[in-house]
Amino acid sequence: MKIFLVWAFLINSYSLFKTGDCASTHDQILSVRASTQEQVDILENITRHEELYESVLLQPVSPWHIKAEADVHLFVSASRSEAVMDLLQKHSISHQVLLNNTKELMELQTKKLPNATRSSSSFYESYHSLEEIYEWINEVALAYPDMVETFSIGSSFENRSLQVLKLSGEKKADKKAIWMDCGIHAREWISPAFCLWFVQHYLKNYKQDQNITHLLDNMDVYVLPVMNPDGYKYTWLHTLTSRNRMWRKNRSHRKGSFCTGVDLNRNFDANWCSEGASNNTCFDTYCGPAAHSEPETQALAEFLRNHSDSVQIYYTIHSYSQMLLFPFSYTRDKAPNHDELLGLVKEVAEKINASTGNTYKYGPGSETIYLAPGGSDDWAYDLGIKYAFTFELQDTGNYGFLLPPSHILQACSEALIAVQTIALRVIEKTKPDSP
């Protein structure tokens, strides 16, 4: 019966697209909610055939995570929006337009403010291209030679450098460290924006802010602003061809593969390619042909292995959904220090709420969102980094991946609360006993 419904649905869809000449003039993002299993099946088929519908599933990240009575966020191009809306209405599926001005928002995200130099606050309240980020890294290193070291941990599939900044306060022997990566998913622009904002905030306020001084004097901080430079570059090249602005994966391709890209956050050797990942090359959660098959994940894994004796905290910055996650995502089993990790993110959520009024969900990834094997935080945790976290920044879907520049400051302030609160607690927990 289900197979029959699927074929009937596809045939009907094709007919609608052939005859639907009156399309919307705007690309749209829809919020859709199924209430029956039949409606779930229909939504799954829309999202499994993105080329046919010129759509991109934004939330959840894969069709098999669509559930009854749960919001689904779907990008639909202008030429297919009316046909998709007709299908939803035909099957009585509840839906509303979240954004009807995606092109306007994309243009806003790439707009440059006048006189926005590296030393100005407006620079950090804007989004920046990959070339601008590389230039910024060089400028920061020159401006703070005593505190910043820059180096590459490897190259991407398209041979772009994976540039890291190392921030240091006092130089000490056997000093512990924090790792933070941003931009593992190409479309999540607020993530690299935070890495830039964080670096400048810490360098500028060292010796001015007691917490920053304490943290940098006790821990070095490694920051990788863009872990997926090829994908990030691709989204900037296609800011006005909206569907490609929503690109998630890297840009690797292999002979015989119809589709491009691997989800770098499904490619780590942490229960790789089990439930929650896809072996379909065209899916956004494609796990790759093997664990650590991608040069980007290889580079990060090699660096963390080589520094596993010093790196105590692992942060990976994502968006959107406002969540504070910790291992495990690949299993529903609890991490050995589950209660400790839960206590840390609970404190962070309470501090963010008190500061900005925003609510962040928190907990282990598998229980808070869904099963997601092959993630970088789980792999880091299994390596021995017992404080491993994924932060999903603003917002909860009103703008999603098109978060306007006017929201950058608050989003970064919230992320800073998370990064700093946990780091200071870890320093306190792990400091040697006084004689």
Image (cartoon, grey):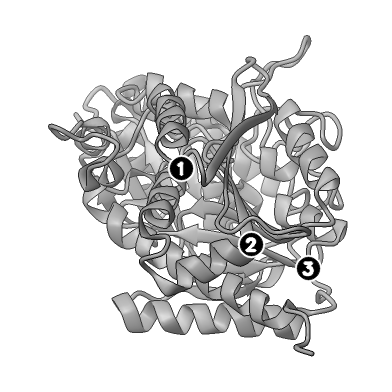
Secondary structure of the residue carrying tag 3 is loop
Q: Which of marks 3 and 2 is nearer the N terminus?
A: 2
In the rendered image, which residue does mark 3 sit on? 386
On screen, 221 above or below 250? below
Q: What residue type is labelled 2?
A: Met
In the rendered image, which residue does mark 1 sit on? 192
Q: What residue type is labelled 3?
A: Lys
Cα distance between the residues tagged 3 and 2: 16 Å
Q: Which of 73 and 366 is in front in this view?
A: 366
On screen, 171 above or below 223? below
On screen, 45 above or below 178? above
Residue at 46% across, 28% down: 138
Residue at 54% across, 36% down: 226
Q: Which of 152 and 270 is in front in this view?
A: 152
Residue 52 percent across, percent down from the top left: 49, 26
Task: Tell me if residue 271 can be seen.
Answer: yes
Q: In which quarter of the image is the C terminus?
A: bottom right
Cα distance between the residues tagged 1 and 3: 24 Å
Secondary structure of the residue carrying tag 1 is helix
Q: Which of marks 3 and 2 is in front?
A: 2
How many numbered marks are there? 3
Q: Nearer the viewer, mark 2 or mark 1?
A: 2
Please report contact status of discs 3 and 2: CB closer than 8 Å, yes or no.
no
Secondary structure of the residue carrying tag 2 is strand
Residue at 20% across, 31% down: 112
In the rendered image, which residue does mark 2 sit on? 219
Q: Nearer the viewer, residue 58 or 293?
A: 293
The 10 Å Cα crowd at callout 3, few under 14, some 14 to 19, many 20 or more, is: many
Q: What residue type is labelled 1?
A: Pro
Q: In which image quadrant can residue 425 be found?
A: bottom right
